[in-house]
Amino acid sequence: MRTGLALAGLLLALAVPAGRSASAAAAPPPLPGAVEIAVDQNRLNAVVGERLTLESRVVNSGDAPTDRLVAHLNVASLDGVYVDLEDWSADVTREVPPVAPSSSTSLTWEFQAVNTGSFDVYLVLMPNGGSTAGTGPLVVSQPVHVTVAGKRTLTAAGSLPVAVVVPIVLGLVAAAARYRIRRPA
């Protein structure tokens, strides 16, 4: 029995080319064509709460059509700030129909700057066809560097003068109006 298992393992090792595992040898070939995803800019500046738009193009420079693809928007903090992607955009995943050879398709992404700091926004393409889903390779865009500044808001320290001065001014205006009305002509 041991000899049979050892012989089966030896035959499997000889059947797989050097440097590859048995699971890699069984994987389907990568997507046909040279697929890439390009973005329209490399830097964005924003203020917390501002809506941003990113244009991208899925390009097939190969000689065969792609299978269906999935495009996914990602936001990574460069400052260690926690990023909840659902806060940045409700629309982070898009299905991309097959792209013909030497063609492209455009995708527009809208998202909102939620946290202050420095971030990289990038897109990932994944195969999603019947035989290619979950097989790779993944295609990643160049990152778009996003710098998000804080928004100045009225703080408790800044509201104290307003809270004190406004009632005093209103009281003086009311007193002046009352004095004018009572003054004999």
Image (cartoon, rainbow, N blue to C red):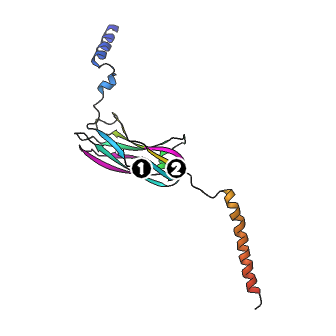
Q: Residue furthest left?
A: 63
Q: Is residue 104 magenta?
A: yes
In space, the residues marked 2 and 1 are separated at their CA atoms by: 20 Å
Q: Position of residue 183 (x, y in %)?
A: 77, 87
Query: Dot 1 lies on which element?
Result: loop
The residue under label 1 is: 91
For residue 140, which quarter of the picture? top left
For residue 30, which quarter of the picture? top left
Q: Is residue 94 magenta?
A: yes
The residue under label 2 is: 148
Label 1 is placed on what type of residue?
Asp
Q: Is residue 129 visible?
A: no
Q: Position of residue 76 (x, y in %)?
A: 48, 41
First reached walking from the N terminus: tag 2 or tag 1 = 1
In the image: residue 121, left or right of residue 178: left
Q: Residue furthest bottom?
A: 185
In the image: residue 24, left or right of residue 88: left
In the image: residue 179, left or right of residue 150: right
**Main secondary-structure element of the magenta-colored stretch:** strand
88 up-or-down from 169: above or below:
above
Range drawn in magenta = 93-121
Q: Position of residue 171 (x, y in %)?
A: 73, 74
Crowding at mark 2 (Cα within 10 Å: few <14, some 14-19, many 20+) = many
Q: Is residue 153 visible?
A: yes
Q: Residue at x 25, y 39 (%)?
A: 62
Q: Residue at x 31, y 13 (%)?
A: 10
Q: Residue at x 70, y 73 (%)?
A: 170
Please identify, in this view, whether the residue under mark 2 or under mark 1 is nearer the observer.
Answer: 2
Label 2 is placed on what type of residue?
Val
